[in-house]
């Protein structure tokens, strides 16, 4: 089948270095970043489990989780129809139509769309910046992905807790600067942190990302995993990064 059938003006295929999978992106709109890839490497979807990615964008996390795990089925929920359309075409070009569903809808209504306690795993790479953190990108697709214009941290955590089965797992990547706010939101919705991993650009620099694994209704005990440095030296990725990317 001609690749032109799948691509629209301004779009391109990017190789995911996993199972021959590719993803459709438009660099003028929004392309996935390292945070999404790191989250897909941190998350665990076990054999027979069903997972949902909230605010899936162009579908990067469900596609990578399909490649990396033995999960039974994956769903992506996305409010921007243009991104959801790219995600559906990426699912189709990779032959994953039976394994991944892309649903158009508002994250804030996720539990109404899918019902309560229906997923084993929820993942999310949410907007990091609220109205007090950073300038709003003038390009709307990028702004929605990076700023809390369409949903807040509270919305994300609340809906994740509702969607999860008892004992289900929630995986999120966020910014360390909002750690206190994140922990309070998790506590309000009975999502107990079980694993945390800080990501540093270099090992001697402050972290700029933090990865969470939480359990719905789990016990109050968290393991802080060894930190992850992205670069060994300028321009050279650390070994763990290359393993996550599949290089």
Image (cartoon, rainbow, N blue to C red):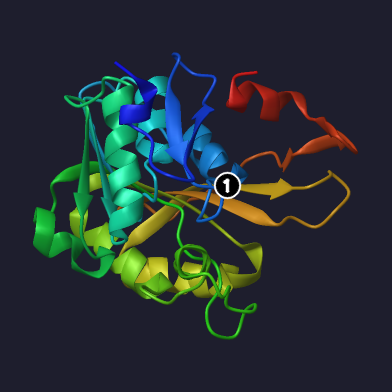
Figure quadrant of the C terminus: top right
At x 40%, y 66%, the residue is 186
In-image side of 98 versus 128 (left or right): left
Tell me the SS state at disc 1: helix
Q: Position of residue 46 (x, y in %)?
A: 31, 25
Q: Position of residue 189 (x, y in %)?
A: 30, 68
Q: Position of residue 145 (x, y in %)?
A: 47, 62
At x 59%, y 27%, the residue is 244
In which image quadrant can residue 75 be found? top left
The residue tagged 1 is 35
At x 51%, y 63%, the residue is 142
Disc 1 packing (10 Å; few <14; some 14–19; many ≥20) = some
In-image side of 127 versus 3 (left or right): right
Q: Position of residue 50 (x, y in %)?
A: 21, 34
- 202 vs 17, nearest the viewer: 17
- 28 vs 110, nearest the viewer: 28
- 40 vs 45, nearest the viewer: 40
- 43 vs 106, nearest the viewer: 106
């Amino acid at each position: 089948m001609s690749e032109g059938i799948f691509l629209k003006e301004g779009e391109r295929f990017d190789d995911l270095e996993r199972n021959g999978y590719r993803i459709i992106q438009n660099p003028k709109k929004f392309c996935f970043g390292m945070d999404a890839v790191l989250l897909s490497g941190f998350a665990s979807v076990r054999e027979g489990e069903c997972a949902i990615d909230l605010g899936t964008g162009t579908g990067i996390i469900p596609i990578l989780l399909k490649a990396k795990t033995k999960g039974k089925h994956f769903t992506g929920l996305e409010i921007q129809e243009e991104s959801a359309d790219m995600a559906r075409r990426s699912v189709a070009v990779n032959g994953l139509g039976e394994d991944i569903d892309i649903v158009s809808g508002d994250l804030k209504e996720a539990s109404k769309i899918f019902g309560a306690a229906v997923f084993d795993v929820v993942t999310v790479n949410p907007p990091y910046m609220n109205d007090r953190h950073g300038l709003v990108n003038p390009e709307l697709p990028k702004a929605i992905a990076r700023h809390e214009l369409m949903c807040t941290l509270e919305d994300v955590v609340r809906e994740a807790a509702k969607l999860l089965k008892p004992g289900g797992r929630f995986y999120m990547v966020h910014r360390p600067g909002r750690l206190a706010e994140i922990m309070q939101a998790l506590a309000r919705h009975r999502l107990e942190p079980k694993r945390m991993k800080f990501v540093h650009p270099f090992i001697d620099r402050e972290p700029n990302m933090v990865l969470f694994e939480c359990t719905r209704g789990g016990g109050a005990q968290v393991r802080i995993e060894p930190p992850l440095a992205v670069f060994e030296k300028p321009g050279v990725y650390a070994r763990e990064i290359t393993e996550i990317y599949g290089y």
